[in-house]
Image (cartoon, coloured by chain):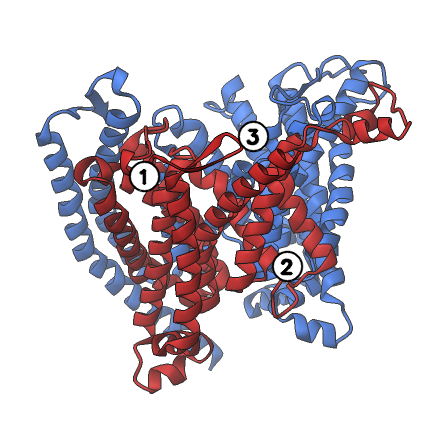
Amino acid sequence: MSGRAIAGLGVRGRHWAFDWPMRHRGWLATFAALVLLPLVPGLNSDFGRSLLTQMAIAAVFALSYNVLFGQTGLLSFGHAVYFGIGGYAAIHLMRAVNHGLALPMPFVPLAGAIAGVAFGALFGALTTRRAGTIFALITLGIGELAYAAAFMLPNLFGGEEGVTASRTRAPEVLGIGLASQIAVYYVVAAWAFVAALSMRAFTATPVGRMCNAVRDNPQRAAFVGYDPRIVRLVACCVSGLFAGLAGGLHAINYEIVAADSLGALRSGGVLLMTCIGGAGHFAGPVLGAMVLTWLEASLSGYTSAWLLYLGLFFMVIVVFAPRGVAGLIAMHAPVVRTPAFARVLLAYVVAAAPAGVTMGGLVALIEMSYRVSTQPELGTKMRIAGIAVDAASSASWVGAVFVATAGFVAFRATWRVVAAAWTLAEEQSRAVKGTSSS
Amino acid sequence: MTEIVAVSLLNGIVYGLLLFMLTSGLTLIFSMMGVLNFAHASVFMLGAYLSFQLGRWIGFWPALVTAPILCGLIGAAIERYGLRYVHRSGHVAEILFTFGLAYVIEELVTMAWGRNAVANSVPPSIDFALFSLFGSSFPAYKGLMMVISVAMFAFLYVALRSTRIGLVIQAALTHPEMTSALGHDVPGVFVLVFALGSALAGLAGVIGGFMLLTQPTLAQAIGPIVFVVVVVGGLGSLAGAFIASMLIGVLQTFAVAIDYSLADVLRAGGVAVARGSLLYDFVSIKVSTVAPIVPYLLLVLTLVVRPRGLLGKRDV
């Protein structure tokens, strides 16, 4: 905080043309990345652009979740309800556009946002009496209710098959239709950028600050004159708005919305994204959304055990890094300028080798078990990371256990090197702080 | 008519007692430790699978004892080597931990027994007709389940209220430091409570496995309903959980049996709703179709009418 204040003093008096870009360099970099990423080699294919589109949608969804979770302290297990309802609202509007309504397709996600706000207000009124455990349980129930209701009203929700529409049968804006994946990407990216900016701005508004106050101490917030219930309700509406928008973007991207988009799996997914990325930082959920979307797209094709890896990864994060990946990165901020930081990085490299070996052994065990129990028709011979193993021979099982155990023992030993490097770096950073303040 | 009512009532009580078996362990853990265990239904599922496997190796009756004990040991390990370290980060972190655990247990079960349901059939020693009601026989394993469920209720009720260890457990929840200073092993008490709760879930799983399909999605299917029971009954109240279980069991079973919709009622009253309209979609839903969401409707109703739950002490 003090560093920022000093930096602010340093640039005061400079010309605004220099000052403004410096203050907003993070957002400008994000904007540039959003524009340029689909053109980068490797991502400039339809697959790459589709992946980027999914990431942007997931990022908006995770950010909207964090308005509830990180900002207001409400743990929800039914957030996909708003996403799904937004998706259904958008897809029905798309159908209307297909039948001749004169609305350019890029504005369709707004229908999702409106539906999201409406249902955020409705469910928020039911659920925001108390935070904590009860809120979690009630949102879980509402999630199940919405999912089941989707199957009971087939005309509205399309039952098992869902509702489909076409994004190309629509009036064009400036001669650009939504036929290509890159056009879809830019529409989604533009909405995602606007949504992220708005949610960031919301954190700075008085009501956004009151959300933090209600999260930290509802009694005191009530005592200074803010009804915690109303503040939570506002958070629910804002969160619902952007979750609905994400659902609308999803509808444009896939041209189909089915009941699974309001199901428990998606609700759990957004919780995982936010926690893995880190709920305490604004960029954390974005990070989590990108990492998880990428992992799912790349891993789920190779392994049927994807959910097991995800669950284990999540538990490791909850136990060892409660502030998420963003928290792990932010932890390095104080020591990054110390001379010992190079040693910390070196120690990481040293510890990464046995950690990789341990994981290799565990992955081999998990993959062999899965093959034997869920895909016996594929036979027992398989390749794991290029190494041929036979799940039928006991040698491969003993070998995998040995590799995992040996790796773990070595990892425990190398962890001391990391700890020593960290202690040194922290001492140095404290010493630097001591001299600068005196 | 009497036939439908009698049979539905009996089935409803059976289902309600099964729900209570599931909820009792969860309520125990929640009321004593303040931990909402999202992996509880997963431990229940584990109990069903373990009894299936052990039943093949050592027979049903030994499995009925050993499977819950194994589940209890697993629960103890979860508390001792996982939950204890998350405890200091607060209740939300505990919920997240058990939430992740539910994913992992589901996948581990898939890994061990495959994605399809296993043939967890009722052993012959308890698969005979106990009595018959209007021509449909009532199997003995359901009777066993009812006896075990009621016994669980009585055991927990007495154990927590009238025994010394129950007092220590309750004290450890509200005043952990004071209890510890008086010479009681508070972390040990927590391990014990979690193990007991998990063992109860395992026991429920042994019997419940016969009545529900023993497959990896079992936990997902039953888990949310268990949480509804906890909220409707009043958070942490054992008697409330018992009443709520019975209520949901009976209501849901009756709903399944009613093959009428609101449209039929309206038609009998002389009101016709035009086909094809959205309103018709709503009113033509049969009550039997609504049955799966009865617990959740009850949840919403509870929140509106009586937010503290049936026997809860505080507002939720």
Q: Nearer the viewer, residue A412 or A69?
A: A69
For the point 71% across and 27% down, the residue is: A153
Look at mark 3 in the image and give the residue it sits on.
A54
Q: Amino acid at mark 1?
A: Ile
Vertical position of residue B172 compared to residue A35: above or below: below
- Element class at badge 3: helix
Same chain for labels 2 and 3? Say yes or no: yes
Q: Nearer the viewer, mark 3 or mark 1?
A: 1
Whether label 2 touches label 3, CB < 8 Å: no
**Distance Cα–Cα, label 3 vs label 1:** 53 Å
Picture quarter containing residue B304? bottom right
Q: Amino acid at mark 3?
A: Gln
Look at mark 1 in the image and give the residue it sits on.
B126
Q: Chain of mark 2?
A: A
**Chain A shade in the render:** blue
Q: Residues within 10 Å of mark 2 (few under 14, many from 20)?
A: many
Q: Nearer the viewer, mark 2 or mark 3?
A: 2
Q: Residues within 10 Å of mark 3 (few under 14, many from 20)?
A: many
Q: Amino acid at mark 2?
A: Thr
Residue A257 visible in the snapshot: yes
For the point 64% across and 54% down, the residue is: A23
**Distance Cα–Cα, label 2 vs label 3:** 26 Å
**Chain B shade in the render:** red
- Element class at badge 1: helix
Residue B265 image position (x, y, % from top left): 81, 31
Residue A431 image position (x, y, % from top left): 37, 75
Which quarter of the figure is the N terminus of chain A placed in? bottom right
